[in-house]
């Protein structure tokens, strides 16, 4: 048996950058991605797949805006749940087709995943995560009047900002563990999971988004996975990305990664949470995190490419 693995796909894995998002394109790109990931599918590893959902939730928010007064409003955490259903369908169907083409048959299940966050998390006081479409100044004023904070992002306009609290607990972890033991490929924690809080003994959803990579690290830790594989659009993590001092990072211990994180060498909202997730996951002995892209996946799995974060 190979390492129990959690594969974290970016939300942009289902569409080309800048291209219009359609269901047909999502299936096309999912097929390209999973055909490239065949080394993970053809062995007997216990596999979980998480995914981002930024582009999908952005489109859902546009639909909500357009339907105001015509249909019931959908809060943000329900948009996350709907994106888990949409991309869970895309992933499971595509995986079945890719496996069938290779004469392989494995059960696959997509799990709506609720993630408990702390209602006192500072993120609820200081929201920072930008979501959804860009608005003009006039549109932004109208949205502010409905109680939604926004942030100006250069010439492109204004965007809503929402809390992004730390994941603390995964409600469905026992179900996921049972499926893994039964050799089911599990799609879970999509978009970081559906954010909920516990209040007076009851769970309830909150308007927030949880970082997909941080939830993946937590899920992997809870089910004792040994490998966290974060696929992104660059071949590795870089120190001081897009600056004259940019340099690729190969194999690195968690102490050095933590130092670089604290010194601000990674982009906030891009590589920073990936490195943070890698540190959290790889803090256990014999666990490692690989950050790479599809093109160098095979070499990265052999330790010859990508960024590898491992226990000191």
Image (spheres, rainbow, N blue to C red):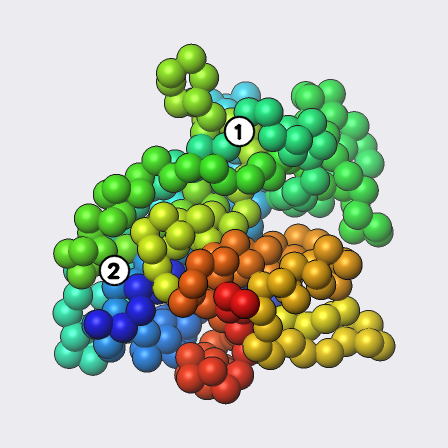
Residue 162, compared with residue 70, is above or below; it is below
Pick the front one: 75 or 21: 75
Placement of the N terminus among the 4 image quadrants: bottom left
Q: How many marks?
A: 2
- 31 sits to left or right of 284: left
In front: mark 2 or mark 1? Answer: 1
Q: From what the image shows, is residue 148 above or below residue 151?
A: above
Percent x, y for residue 42? 24, 77
From the viewer's perspective, tell me whether residue 25 is left or right of residue 153: left
Q: Nearer the viewer, residue 117 or 151?
A: 117
Q: Which residue is mark 2?
A: 185
Q: Position of residue 15 (x, y in %)?
A: 51, 64
Q: Is residue 37 visible?
A: yes
Please identify the quarter of the rendering in which residue 174 is found. Answer: top left
Q: Residue at x 59, y 73 (%)?
A: 252
Which residue is drawn at the image coordinates 43% and 63% (left, top)? 285
Q: Which residue lies at the image location 62% right of the left edge and 63% below the top edge?
A: 255
Q: Which residue is labeled 1 in the image?
A: 118
> Crowding near pointer 1: few (<14 within 10 Å), some, many (20+)?
some
Q: Quadrant of residue 25?
A: bottom left
User: Do we see residue 83 in this rendering?
Assistant: no
Does dot 1 land on a helix, a strand or a loop? loop
Mark 2 to mark 1 CA distance (whole Å) = 29 Å
Whether 249 is drawn above or below 276: the answer is below
Q: Where, quadrant-wise, is the C terminus in this rendering?
A: bottom right
- The image position of residue 214, as x and y in percent, is 52, 50
Q: Earlier in the sequence, mark 2 or mark 1?
A: 1
Report helix, strand or loop for mark 2: strand
Using a 10 Å C-alpha cutoff, classify the residue at mark 2 as few (fewer than 14 neighbours), some (14 to 19) or many (20 or more): many
């Amino acid at each position: 048996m190979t390492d129990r693995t959690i594969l974290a796909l970016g939300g942009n894995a289902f569409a080309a950058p800048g291209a219009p998002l359609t269901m047909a394109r999502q299936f096309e790109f999912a097929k390209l991605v999973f055909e490239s990931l065949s080394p993970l599918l053809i062995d007997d590893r216990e596999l979980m797949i998480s995914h981002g959902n930024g582009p999908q939730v952005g489109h859902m928010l546009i639909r909500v805006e357009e339907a105001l007064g015509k249909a019931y409003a959908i809060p943000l955490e329900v948009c996350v749940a709907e994106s888990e259903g949409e991309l869970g369908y895309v992933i499971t169907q595509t995986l079945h087709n890719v496996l069938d083409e290779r004469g392989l048959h494995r059960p696959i299940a997509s799990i709506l995943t609720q993630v408990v966050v702390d209602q006192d998390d500072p993120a609820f006081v200081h929201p920072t995560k930008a979501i959804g479409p860009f608005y003009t100044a006039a549109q932004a004023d109208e949205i502010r009047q409905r109680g939604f904070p926004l942030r100006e992002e250069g010439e492109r306009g204004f965007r809503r900002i929402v809390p992004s609290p730390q994941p603390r607990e995964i409600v469905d972890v026992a179900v996921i563990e049972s499926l893994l033991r039964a050799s089911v490929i599990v799609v879970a924690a999509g978009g970081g999971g559906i954010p909920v809080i516990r209040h007076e003994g009851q769970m309830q959803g909150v308007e927030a988004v949880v970082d997909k990579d941080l939830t993946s690290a937590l899920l992997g830790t809870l089910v004792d996975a040994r490998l966290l594989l974060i696929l992104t659009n660059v071949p590795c993590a870089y120190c001081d990305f897009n600056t004259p001092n940019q340099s690729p990072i190969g194999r690195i211990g968690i102490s050095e990664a933590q130092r670089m994180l604290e010194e601000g060498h990674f982009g906030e909202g891009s590589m920073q949470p990936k490195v943070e997730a890698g540190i959290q996951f790889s803090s256990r002995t014999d666990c490692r995190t690989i950050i790479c892209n599809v093109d160098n996946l095979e070499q990265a799995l052999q330790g010859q490419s990508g960024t590898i974060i491992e226990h000191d």
